[in-house]
Image (tube, grey):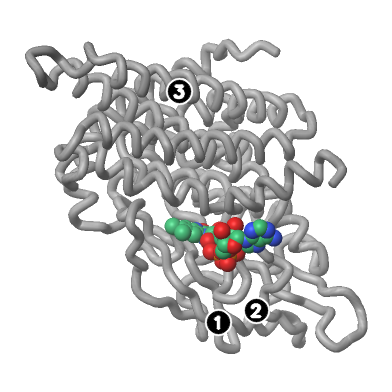
Amino acid sequence: MDLSLTEAERDLVELCRDFAQKEIAPRAPLAWEEARCPTDLLREMGELGLLGMLIPEEWGGIGMTTVGFVAAMEQIGRADQSVAAAWQAHVTIGSLPLYLFGTDDQRERWLRPLAEGRALGAFGLTEPDAGSDARGIRTRAERTDGGWLINGRKTFISNAGTDMSFGVTLLARTGGDGDGGPPRYGSFVVEKGTPGFTMGPKMRGIGWRGLDTRELWFDDVWVPDDHLVGDPEMGLGQFLRTLEMGRISIAALSLSLTQAVLDLATAYAKDRVQFGQPISQFQAVQFKLADIATELEAARWLTYRAAWLRDTGQPFQKEAAMAKLKASRVAAWAASEAVQVHGGVGYMLDSPVARFYCDSKVLEIGEGTNEIQHLVIARALGC
Ligand SMILES: Cc1cc2nc3c(=O)[nH]c(=O)nc-3n(C[C@H](O)[C@H](O)[C@H](O)COP(=O)(O)OP(=O)(O)OC[C@H]3O[C@@H](n4cnc5c(N)ncnc54)[C@H](O)[C@@H]3O)c2cc1C
C-alpha cells in the first residue's frame, strides 16, 4: 500500500489549504452566527472545480481519487465544518447516484451542472419513520402513463433548499405493498419547482449550523419515466452503495475536525499560563494532547486505507464502516478534550473550539449511526 500523494493530489491539497485559510476560515464565525448555507463559498469552490471532485472530466468534474478527496477534506474541514459538510454531501451522496446509476442523458442534464459547480445535489433517503431502517421508508412511487406519481415525506435532507439546489434524488417504494412480493424501491430525480414538491424551513442543529437541512413533502408529484435513476426495483441497493463512499467522506470530515481541535488546544496550552507556567507544562494536559494526536493518526490510517481500497477497485465496505466508526468517535471525544484544555474559554461560543465541539456530535449520527457501522462490520465478520 503506497499512500504517498501524487502530484495532482498534492496540488489539490495546496489549492484547498490556500482557499480554506484565505476564504473559508475568516468567514466561519459570521457563517455560524447567521446559520445559513454559505452558497457564496460553495460557488467559489465550484469555480475551482471542487464540486466535481469525484466525477470524471467527461461529465464536468475533475476526476480526483478518493485519497485526494480525503486529503482535500482535511484542509477544508479544518476551516469550517458547515462548509465542509455541505460540500461533502454534494460531492458524494448528492452527485454519485447520478454518476453511478444514471443514463448518459441524465448525467448530461443533472450531473454536469452539479460537477461544474452550477448546482447543489441532495440525497433523499431518511423519513420520519425510517432512518437507520432504510427498508422501512413509506414514500411511494406508482407507475402511471409515461411516468411515476410520488407521495411521501423525507426528513433531515441536506442541500435541497438552498438558492443553488437543483432538487433531490430520492428513494421511494415501487412495489411490495400488498402485491405479495418483497419490498422494491426505485430512485427518482425530483427537480425544484415540480408541482406538489414542497419543503419546510431550514432545521436548527446544535452544530453544522450553516448546513441547509430540511423536511421535504411530495404530494402527488408526477415525474416522467426519464426521472427514474437506474433500476426501478434495485434503488435501495443503489442508495446503500452510494452511502459506502459517504462513510469515507464523514471519516475524512472527522479527521479534519480532530486536527482542528488538536491545533487549537495545543496553541492554547502553550499560551495559557496558570501556576506560573504555560499549562502545556503540566503532564495531565500534555497527555490529553498526545492521546488526541495518537488517536487521530490511527483514524487517519483507517480512513486513507479505505479510500485507497476504493481507488484500487477492491472491496472497501467494511473498512469504510470502520473508518467512519473510529474517526467520528475520535472527533467527538477529541473535541470534548480540547474544550477541557481551554477551560471556560472553550465553553463560550465565541471560541472556535466550542464551535467544533458543537459540530462534532453529528459525525456519530449522519450517514449511518455508529451503531449501524457496528452492524456492517459485524456482518462482514460473518455474524
Ligand atoms: C444534520 C443531518 C443531516 C442529514 N442529512 C441527510 C441527508 O442529506 N439525506 C438523508 O437521507 N438523511 C440525512 N440525515 C439523516 C441521517 O442519515 C439519520 O439521522 C441517521 O441515519 C439515523 O437515523 P434516525 O435519525 O432516524 O435515527 P434512528 O434510526 O431512529 O436511530 C435512533 C437510535 O437507535 C439506534 N438504532 C437504530 N437501529 C438500531 C439497530 N438495529 N441496532 C442498534 N441500534 C440501532 C441508532 O443507532 C440511534 O442511536 C441527516 C441527519 C442529520 C442530523
SS category of the residue bearing label 1: strand
Marks 2/1: CA distance? Answer: 8 Å
Secondary structure beneath dot 2 equals loop
The front one of 54 and 30 is: 30
Q: Is residue 270 visible?
A: yes
User: Which label's residue is closer to the chain start, 3 or 1?
Assistant: 3
Q: Amino acid at mark 3?
A: Leu
Residue picked out by circle 3: 12
Q: Is residue 102 visible?
A: no
Where residue 377 sits in the image (x, y, percent)? 74, 42
Task: Identify the residue under disc 2.
Answer: 139
* Left or right: 1 in relation to 341: right
Residue 132 lies, in percent from the top left, at 64, 62
Ligand 1 within 8 angstroms of badge 2 C-beta: no
Q: Which residue is mark 1?
A: 218
| 352 shown above or below 223 | above
Chain-order first, disc 3 or disc 2: 3
Q: Residues within 10 Å of mark 2 (few under 14, many from 20)?
A: many
In the displayed structure image, the side of residue 247 where residue 178 appears, left or right: right
Residue at 77% x, 77% y is 174
